[in-house]
Image (cartoon, rainbow, N blue to C red):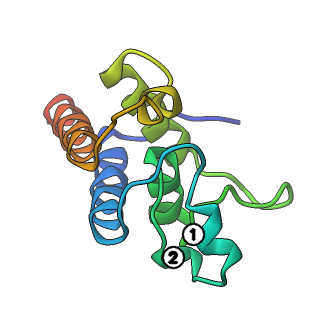
């Protein structure tokens, strides 16, 4: 059964995702920089897209858990909240030509702030 997690929980995950993105860098086109992963770089240390940042914050790496692992409702809510902020699926917005890390970080901050404001 899927439940809607509290806004503060989602905001906390977005803050962790923002910190991860700030640390490793921004990537477009896939959850993470596949070339660096193929070269043996640790997934926890390579650039990620918006969704990859959320996944890394929740699961420790920018991948969805296996089919046999339990997915987090907080992850789904965070991705949905980001999409609501930008007005389209977050992966489409993230991958737009010219999208910059500073823009992605701002969306994470704005989305988290909006969730916290509603949760009060």
Q: Residues within 10 Å of mark 2 (few under 14, many from 20)?
A: some
User: Where is mark 2, residue-wise?
Assistant: 44
Residue at image point 33% right, 36% down = 99
Give the camera-side residue of 64 and 28. Answer: 28
Residue at image point 23% right, 39% down = 103
x%, y% of residue 49?
A: 47, 49
Label 1: which secondary element: loop
Are the residues tagged 1 and 2 within 8 Å (C-beta)?
yes
x%, y% of residue 16?
A: 32, 62
Give the camera-side residue of 46 and 5. Answer: 46
Q: Which callout, 1 or 2, points at the residue further toward the start of the chain?
A: 2
Q: Where does the N terminus fall, quadrant-wise?
A: top right
Residue at image point 47% right, 58% down = 48
x%, y% of residue 89?
A: 50, 23
Give the camera-side residue of 3 and 85. Answer: 85
Residue at image point 67% right, 52% down = 71
Q: Is residue 114 above or below residue 15?
A: above
Relative to 60, 14 lies left or right: left
Check residue 61 in the rendering and tell me which mark sits there, or answer none.
1
Q: Is residue 106 above or below residue 27?
A: above
């Amino acid at each position: 059964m899927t439940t809607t997690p509290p806004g503060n929980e989602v905001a906390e995950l977005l803050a962790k995702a923002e910190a991860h993105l700030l640390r490793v860098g921004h990537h477009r086109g896939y959850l993470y920089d596949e070339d660096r992963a193929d070269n043996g770089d640790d997934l926890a240390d390579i650039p990620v897209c918006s969704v990859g940042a959320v996944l890394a914050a929740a699961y420790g790496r920018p991948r969805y858990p296996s089919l046999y692992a339990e997915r987090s409702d907080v992850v789904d809510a965070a991705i949905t909240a980001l999409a609501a902020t930008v007005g389209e699926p977050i992966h489409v917005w993230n991958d737009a030509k010219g999208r910059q890390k500073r823009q992605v970080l701002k969306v994470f901050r704005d989305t988290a702030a909006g969730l916290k404001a509603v949760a009060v």
